[in-house]
Amino acid sequence: MSERLKITRGSGNVFRDIGFNAEEAENLKLRADLMMRIEDSYRKSGATQAATAKALGLTTPRFNALLKGKIGLFSLDALVNIAVRAGMSVELRVKKAA
């Protein structure tokens, strides 16, 4: 137990840290954030999956895939549309990278 642990500071984007290129990592980060916010809204609503799926214009299996975090099944466009249907406002801020 005398070994020292090596600690590496993360970039702030877990997808970049695990090896995705910068463009894909940023896209995945945005999609993951939208998916989590949509799920949080659903959980707070107390509605059933079926009712929520219908209100969002999705099938229940598709909504279930979103809740399970199947990020590869959802484009950024699709998630923005779902969030808007859920009554959210989506804003994109662009700034120069550090």
Image (cartoon, rainbow, N blue to C red):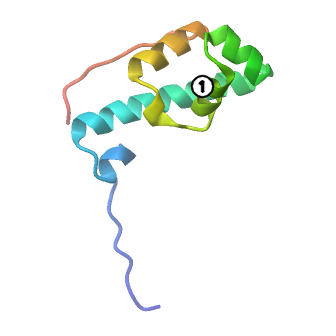
Number of numbered callouts drawn: 1
| Crowd tier of the residue under label 1, counting other residues whose Cα lies within 10 Å: few below 14, some 14–19, many 20 or above | some
Residue 18, above or below 35: below
Confirm whether residue 12 shows in the render.
no
Rendered-image quadrant of the C terminus: top left
Disc 1 marks which amino acid? Arg
| Image position, residue 56 (x, y; %) | 62, 11
Q: Nearer the viewer, residue 13 or 1?
A: 13
| Image position, residue 53 (x, y; %) | 67, 17
Give the quadrant of residue 44.
top right
Q: Nearer the viewer, residue 96 or 17?
A: 17
For image coordinates 47% across by 30% down, the residue present is 73
> With 98 as the anchor, is 6 left or right in this view?
right
> With 91 as the anchor, is 64 left or right in this view?
right
Residue 29, above or below 21: above
Give the quadrant of residue 83.
top right
Residue at the bottom extreme of this rendering: 2
| Image position, residue 49 (x, y; %) | 74, 23
Residue 84, above or below 26: above
Confirm whether residue 42 shows in the render.
yes
| Image position, residue 72 (x, y; %) | 43, 35
For image coordinates 48% across by 19% down, the residue present is 79
Q: Nearer the viewer, residue 39 or 4?
A: 39
Residue 3, above or below 7: below
> With 47 as the anchor, is 18 left or right in this view?
left
Q: Secondary structure at mark 1?
A: helix
For image coordinates 31% across by 34% down, the residue present is 26
For image coordinates 59% across by 23% down, the residue present is 38
- Judging by the rendered image, the residue that carries numbered circle 1 is 62
Q: Nearer the viewer, residue 70 or 16?
A: 70
